[in-house]
Image (cartoon, rainbow, N blue to C red):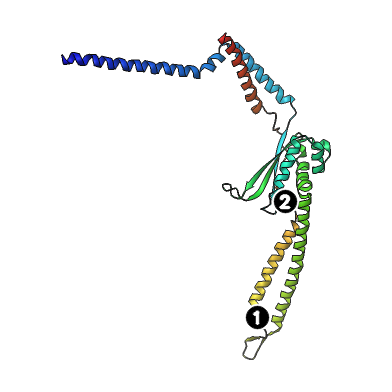
Amino acid sequence: MSEQQNRPAYHEDEFDVEVMAGKLWRIQKKIWKKIFFPFTVLFLRPKRLVLIMGISILLAVILRYTLPPFYESSFVIKPSNSGDVYYLGMLHDLNLMLKDKNWPAVAEKLKVDVATAEKLHQVDVSPIYKNTFRQDTITAVEIALIMSDAMLIDTFQQSILTNYLCGSPYYFKSKQIRKKDLAAMEVRMVADLEENDSLKKVLTRNAFPRGNGGFVYGEPLDPLKVYEAGFAMYQKMINLRSELEYTESFELVKPGVVRIKPFFPRLIILLPVFIGIGLIVCLVLNYREYKG
């Protein structure tokens, strides 16, 4: 009697598992059906899909060889003052003028003619940090130019660096002050070197042999320290004259190069775009028929 009572309960549990498994299978089928539904609609009309894809590829190839080309090249500049960031705002303003297509203003700032300015389309600035993680000190800046004439990279590079940045009132004045300070320091250092040479001559004259074979110095100075001081001043003089050679606010670290391969249009960009548009068009057309 106990076996008969237990047997229906066992079959009832087994039936519930099968029902649950069936529900899970149907849910899974619905999920996969929804996932692959777009592909099902796309291949609803295979000939239409092939035709639209062919047209999309053809349009991408035609535009590749008919649209006016744009070229990208970049150069790297280094500010003489690592704490200076004002030039970043100037470069941002230049890019805004290009976005507004304010060619006369761009031509005036860069000291070029309007026809040349119209061939510059974008200026992108990428700071190079001393510490990439902290990004606290900018050591250099990479300036990328997008142009319609690749041969103008040297012209725009020189115009941005010399005419626009260094030629601005702020940086021009900073350069004059720096040159004046360095020149005054050079005069002072030359006088110090002459004084050090005179002191060495005095020490040499006052050092003479005595009867015991030794030397007696008339001045209580250490000649070695005098020579070391003179050598240190000479090194400073060399460094100072090196700085006088680079009084500009910016230094060109890496010049731009002429790029013969256009930045745009390129098939690697146009093909995915037009194929994606073609797939969307085909999907919409097929879905209308599917719903109808």
| Mark 2 residue type | Phe
* Pick the front one: 189 or 9: 9
The residue tagged 2 is 250
- Secondary structure at numbered mark 2: strand
Q: Is residue 270 visible?
A: yes
Q: Nearer the viewer, mark 1 or mark 2?
A: 2
**How far apart, in angstroms, are the residues tagged by discs 1 and 2?**
45 Å
Residue 24 x/y as whole percent:
39, 18
Quarter the C terminus occupies: top right
Say which quarter of the image contains residue 184: bottom right
Q: Are marks 1 and 2 in contact (CB under 8 Å)?
A: no
Give whichever of discs 1 and 2 has the lower sequence position: 1
Q: Residues within 10 Å of mark 2 (few under 14, many from 20)?
A: some
- Indicate whether 39 appears above or below 264: above
The residue tagged 1 is 221
Residue 17 x/y as whole percent:
32, 18
Residue 275 x/y as whole percent:
62, 21
- Secondary structure at numbered mark 1: loop
Residue occupying the point 30% across, 14% down: 15
Residue 7 x/y as whole percent:
22, 14
Residue occupying the point 66% across, 17% down: 55
Residue occupying the point 33% across, 15% down: 18
Residue occupying the point 81% across, 39% down: 105
Quarter the N terminus occupies: top left
Which residue is at the far right?
113
- Indicate whether 193 appears above or below 263: below
- Indicate whether 188 appears above or below 60: below
| Mark 1 residue type | Leu
Q: Is residue 256 visible?
A: no
